[in-house]
Amino acid sequence: MSNRIINFNAGPAVLPVDVLEQAQSELLNFNDTGMSILEISHRSKPYEAVNNEAEANLKELLGLGEDYQVLFVQGGASTQFAMVPLNFLTPRRTADYILTGVWSEKALKEAKLVGQTHIAATTAKDNYRRIPELAEIQLSDNPAYIHITSNNTIFGTQWRELPNFSGNIPLIADMSSDILCRPFDASKFALIYAGAQKNLGPSGVTAVIIRRDLAENNPKTIPTMLRYETHAANHSLYNTPPTFGVYLLNLVLRWIKAQGGLASLEQRNLAKAKLIYDVIDDSHGFYRGHADKSSRSIMNITFRLPNEELEKLFVAESIAAGMAGLKGHRSVGGLRASIYNAMPVDGCRALRDFMKEFCRKHG
């Protein structure tokens, strides 16, 4: 597909070409039903099979058993910011948040509307250049749960080592931008949520991996659609789900398994990130990475140039070179390369070569 550009957008983001081609081939007639997956009832056996396989594939990749359930819901991570405290922040308890960027701030903002909160750690004073050290985290006396954001798309930071806390405090994570990029112990988390549009599939579906005991006896005082037990009891089919999104998400999960799983993807993701970070580090200050080296993300690489005029020129010339999405988030400016699982190594090599040549011409 020579007419495709190299897509560094942060989300919706690049999808595997193999997945897109399979979806294209099945679009008019899915699984010999004579209908498109876009037309099939969510109550039908063909769609139920898709839904069940997607849940099984995600649990398999995460190494989780029957004590966990996968929910496919709508509203993105932004709705999860509210659902988490609505379901779990009870009176006389405190929700602990570790702030590492804009999205964790937004999650905290929603929790404050529900009940008592506590900032267990923050690197805001460092302009979110780093992830807090474990020694910096100070929990409240009686946490209802602890919330983290595993990867930060805007600032380009990522937890190198995911935290672990003693006791039975539920650990909850927004993993929208790095889920399945590497192996990790998912069983230490009580709940993981992720908008699909970065590393799992298309926009419109959100995956929630929840321990079954947390999906029971949620408060009846909150709306039905905002209770996890509603979706858990109905296997994500209480209302019409984002059927096409779940179908594509399942194709991505199949693709990940075909690549060799998370261990294989981690090695490839590390190699891809190194190609670009090496250019930044070897540029003698022409490229300035935002994140401290100890907290660098392997999914979102953020950097600046000596001035904004050069940054605008960089974006313009990269577009002319067949690349898209390298402009930084509107809230912070600069430049950003999002290199999710589906970004091929050749795409990162092309960016590396472009960055070297741009530095040679303008450095």
Image: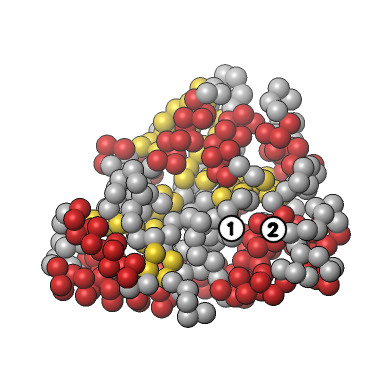
Q: Look at label 2 and name its amino acid.
A: Phe
Residue 71, percent from left and from top: 69, 48
Residue drawn at point x = 62 percent, y = 29 percent = 86
For the C terminus, which image quadrant? bottom left
Q: Which mark is residue 244?
A: 2
Please name the residue that numbered disc 1 is placed on: 202
Residue 318, percent from left and from top: 31, 68
How many neighbours does mark 1 have within 10 angstroms: few (below 14), some (14-19), or many (20 or more)? many
Q: Kindly tell me whether residue 98 is visible in this rendering.
A: no
- Classify residue 289 as left or right of residue 363: right
Residue drawn at point x = 24 percent, y = 57 percent = 312
Disc 2 on helix, strand or loop? helix
Residue drawn at point x = 15 percent, y = 72 percent = 361
The residues tagged by marks 2 and 1 sit, at their Cα atoms, a distance apart of: 9 Å
Between 135 and 110, the one lying in front of the other is 110
Disc 1 on helix, strand or loop? loop
Residue 332, percent from left and from top: 30, 45
* Residue, far bottom: 2
Q: Is residue 259 above or below residue 305?
A: below
Q: Look at label 1 and name its amino acid.
A: Pro
